[in-house]
Amino acid sequence: MPKASLTEDSRAATRAFEQWLGQHLSLLEPDLELKHEQMAQSVSAFLRATFYRFMQRWFASAGDLARAPLVLAVGDLHMENFGTWRDAEGRLVWGINDFDEAYALPYTLDLLRLVVSAGAARRDGNLKISLEDAAQAVLTGYQAGLNAGGKPFVLEEQNSWLRELTGKSKDPVRFWAKLTALTPLERPISTVSPVLEQVLRDALPDGATVRFAHRVAGLGSLGRVRVVALTEWQGGWMAREAKALAPSAVVWAASHLKSGLEKTGPLYYADLLARAVRSPDPTVHIVEQTGQILGPSGQSYVVRRLSPSSRRLNLLDLPRGCDEAQLLEAMGFETANIHLGTPDRVSAIQADLKARAKGWLLEGASKLLEGTLEDWRVWKG
């Protein structure tokens, strides 16, 4: 991986990144302003919103950690990038649920960022576990996942503790009330993007009466176009969402630091989903759109189901006294499920893990957490 020194602070980096991102998709200024406000609220929010800055710090300081075996990695991994969905059998499944920033990266990066997110949550008062214990839990789970060859977290007759901890569905009444209260798009979607309209209609039953709305959600992707299609069908509501995709911020961070990498790159979202050990949500798919009016030609979207069962983990919802180490161990195992999608690197990863000095994950996470805190303080002013 390339190495470079930091030449700007988090504010300058954000301006440069958003300028680059705007070359790949249409950015919604009101949503970006909201994102900037939320970035100042907590270390965790800042970390979630600034994967691009995390990658700058990684390229500048990772050292030996960057020489680890490459895998198709999540990239933007953090504790709130886990959640639940329904698989093809209607079973509730838990795991990593966002791959916007997927890229070929050293396996160490995903582990480090996950531990850094635990440290940020502790700094915000949302977790009690120490950074040392968090690192140990993640590493224990990761190694167990590699050794077992992976296994999805289906929350049925197994994993009852995880179902009770994180798998409870949102209240359907409140969920649908909030979603159906979204303001409809001011213009017919066909005037914005006829292809996108057809993609969303195709994801819902034939003959359904569909209405479209813009949804404000997420943090890392806040500012991108999100279009929701809603229909009331056979006694209840259904919804699909299309979210705009762009090349991973890994590409920007590398090219911005003059590493010689290209200024654009392929999307790995679909590839990662197809290769990982998981019981997938059958509604999730990637659509390439061309000839659109809203944004540059060739825009891609991830389309997925919205439902009370499809929910992101919110650390504020964790019950008091929950076993945080057990949760982080499961997150480490699920990270192995993703990395096992690069099967020819598993033996090399296991050998690399054995060769690393004790405490490497804690040491690396401590350094990156301190850098994130520094960047957050600059952002807050």
Image: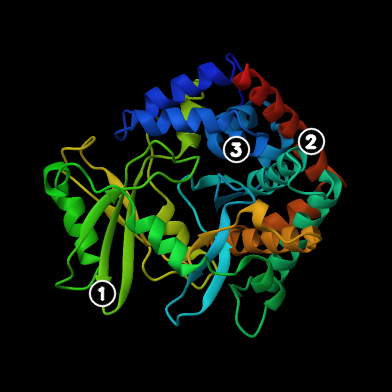
Amino acid at pointer 3: Ala
Q: Which residue is drawn at 47% across and 66% down?
A: 308
Element assignment for label 1: strand
Q: In which quarter of the image is residue 291?
A: top left
Residue 21 seen in this snapshot: yes
Neighbor class of circle 1 (other Cα within 10 Å; few <14, some 14-19, many 20+) is some
The answer, for residue 1, to whether it is visible in the render is no
Do labels 1 and 2 touch, CB within 8 Å?
Answer: no
- The quadrant the N terminus occupies is top right
Position of residue 21 in the picture relative to residue 36 (left or right): left
The mark nearer the N terminus, 3 or 2, is 3
Residue holding disc 1: 233
First in sequence: mark 1 vs mark 2: 1
Query: Circle 2 sits in a helix, a strand or a loop, which is it?
Result: helix
Residue 12, compared with residue 197, is above or below; it is: above
1 vs 2, front mark: 1
Three-letter code for the amino acid on which mark 1 is drawn: Trp
- Relative image position of residue 209 (x, y in whole percent): 17, 66
Label 1 or label 3, whichever lies nearer to me, is: 1
Residue 143: x percent and y percent? 75, 62
Judging depth in this view, the residue of 174 and 339 nearest the camera is: 174
- Badge 3 is on which residue? 45
Q: Which of 69 and 272 is in front in this view?
A: 272
Where is residue 146? Give x, y as percent.
Answer: 69, 65
Q: In which quarter of the image is the C terminus?
A: top right
Amino acid under disc 2: Ser
Residue that extends furthest to the bottom in the rendered view of this protein: 157
Q: Residues within 10 Å of mark 2 (few under 14, many from 20)?
A: some
Residue at which label 2 appears: 366
Pointer 1 or 3: first along the chain: 3
